[in-house]
Image (spheres, rainbow, N blue to C red):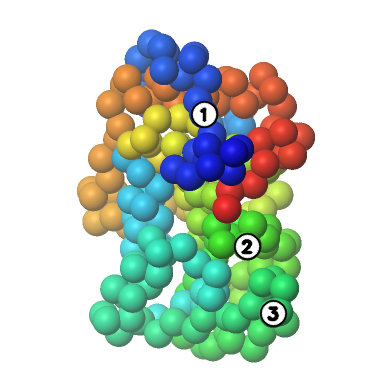
Amino acid sequence: MTYLNNAATTVLKPETVKNAPPASAEETKLRIAKLLGCKGDIALTQSGRQAVRSAILGLVKPGSHVISTDMEYGAVLDVLKELEEGGTAVTYIPVNEYGALRYELLEQAVTPDTSAIVCNHGSNVTGNIADMEKIGAVARRHGLRLIVDGCQTAGATPINLEDMQADAFCFTGHKKLMGPYGTGGICLKQGVALDEAALKDIEEPDEKKLGGLCAAVDFLSLIHISEPTRLGMIS
């Protein structure tokens, strides 16, 4: 029955989230930065989908080449399809028989036109966590942007974005972060900025929802998400 309780992709929220006072965007960003180890800017959004869309469109060069994977969530695939229709080439790296990414194919997929790697941190289908050290090493070797969909893992497993070295890490508030629906955001690496056009499309949640997200982050900090089995994985 525990699994059925998670059918809406979220665990039951603490009472502190439901009854939280309003919070400002700056308060929320400080809490998210501390939880995820973000040293750069944070753009708050009204959903993980909006975060993913803004991050990809804000960092991928139109008409270039992008490397992604066969494990991506629909929100990522929708944006990549949109880019392909606009002339951007996308190579999708397959998984092996265990559902793990075939990392050895990443390097082979890089071309002179490649501008970014777009991938998820954890699969919503298999629960597999990607080896970001391997993916990040390829990105750094070739000077590529690394855009990570962390909507399935933020709050469920320990994350330190300084170690991950992602240019953009997208999250949603209502899943394992245990916050309200209608919250999300993009954590940016120091020195990385989204294209102005992408920033204009971002709408921040209202202060009531941000208050709930702050309370959720406080709760996660209290129970120490360094013990990921306590919260489990999202299926």
> In x, y percent, where is residue 29?
47, 30
Upstream in sequence: badge 2 or badge 3: 3
Mark 1 neighbour class, 10 Å CA radius: few under 14, some 14 to 19, many 20 or more: few
Which residue is under mark 3? 96
Q: CA distance from mark 2 to mark 3?
A: 12 Å
> In x, y percent, where is residue 25?
37, 26
Q: Amino acid at mark 3?
A: Asn
Q: Amino acid at mark 2?
A: Thr
Which element is circle 2 on? loop
Label number found at residue 80: none
The residue located at (35%, 25%) in the rendering is 209
> In x, y percent, where is residue 232?
67, 41
Q: In the image shown, does 78 or 108 lie closer to the viewer?
A: 78
Upstream in sequence: badge 1 or badge 3: 1
Residue 84 in view of the camera? yes
Q: Amino acid at mark 1?
A: Leu
Which residue is under mark 2? 126
Residue 132 in view of the camera? no
Q: CA distance from mark 2 to mark 1?
A: 22 Å
Q: Quadrant of residue 144?
A: bottom right
Q: CA distance from mark 1 to mark 3?
A: 34 Å
Q: Residue furthest front?
A: 1
Which element is circle 1 on? loop
The residue located at (26%, 80%) in the rendering is 86
